């Protein structure tokens, strides 16, 4: 191994270790699985999720639309609920460290992050969506 490669690997290891450890109220916490979805290491996480997304293409049935932002996905599915459940099972078997869940739209207006998506004349429209939180 070249000296420069060894130094880069050591620097990357040090950077990762700095990023996965944090202090809160005088206690030290270490993230033991995965990487934080924030700078500077979110780029590595993003590359890993991109690799996972290419694995989705091995499924016979595909979403009509698949959009990813970091580790959140938005999909439009047109093959029926049973096939959707099968697809979810398929992608959950691709990597034991990544498990996907799904929310199925109920009001013809699915939400993705802080966006409400609406269908109109064959197009998708979007607007800012704010969840209403009930106060106790």
Image (cartoon, grey):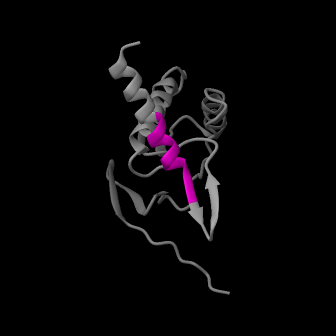
Q: Quadrant of residue 6?
A: top left
Based on the picture, tell me whether residue 15 belongs to the magenta stretch. Answer: yes
Q: Inspect the magenta stretch and tell me whether residue 95 lies in it.
A: no
User: Could you say which is closer to the camera, residue 102 or residue 82?
Assistant: 102
Q: Main secondary structure of the magenta part?
A: helix
- Residue 49 or 110: which is nearer the viewer? 49
**128 displayed left or right of 87:** left
- Residue 88's x, y, as percent? 62, 36
Image: magenta residue range = 13-22
Residue at 62 percent across and 71 percent down: it is 25
Above or below, comparing residue 99 to residue 111 in the picture = above
Residue 50 sits in quarter:
top left
Screen quadrant of the C terminus: bottom right
Percent coordinates x, y for residue 17 in the rendering:
52, 43
Position in image of residue 84 (x %, y %)? 61, 37
Q: Position of residue 23 (x, y in %)?
A: 57, 62
> Which residue does the image show at 59% across and 66% down from the upper left?
24
Whether residue 133 is visible, yes or no, is yes
Using the rendered image of the protein, determine whether residue 105 is visible from the camera's viewpoint: no
**Picture quarter with the N terminus:** top left
Q: Residue at x 43, y 52 (%)?
A: 38
């Amino acid at each position: 191994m070249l000296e420069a490669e060894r130094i880069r690997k050591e620097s990357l290891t040090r950077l990762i270790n700095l990023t996965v450890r944090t202090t809160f109220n005088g206690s030290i916490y270490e993230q033991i699985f995965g990487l934080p979805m924030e700078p500077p290491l979110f780029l590595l996480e993003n590359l890993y999720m991109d690799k996972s997304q290419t694995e989705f293409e091995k499924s016979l049935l595909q979403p009509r639309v698949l959009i990813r932002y970091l580790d959140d996905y938005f999909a439009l599915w047109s093959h029926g609920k049973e096939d959707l459940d099968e697809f979810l099972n398929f992608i959950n078997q691709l990597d034991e460290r990544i498990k996907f869940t799904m929310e199925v739209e109920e009001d013809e207006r699915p939400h993705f992050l802080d966006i409400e998506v609406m269908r109109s004349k064959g197009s998708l429209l979007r607007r800012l969506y704010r969840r209403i939180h009930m106060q106790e």
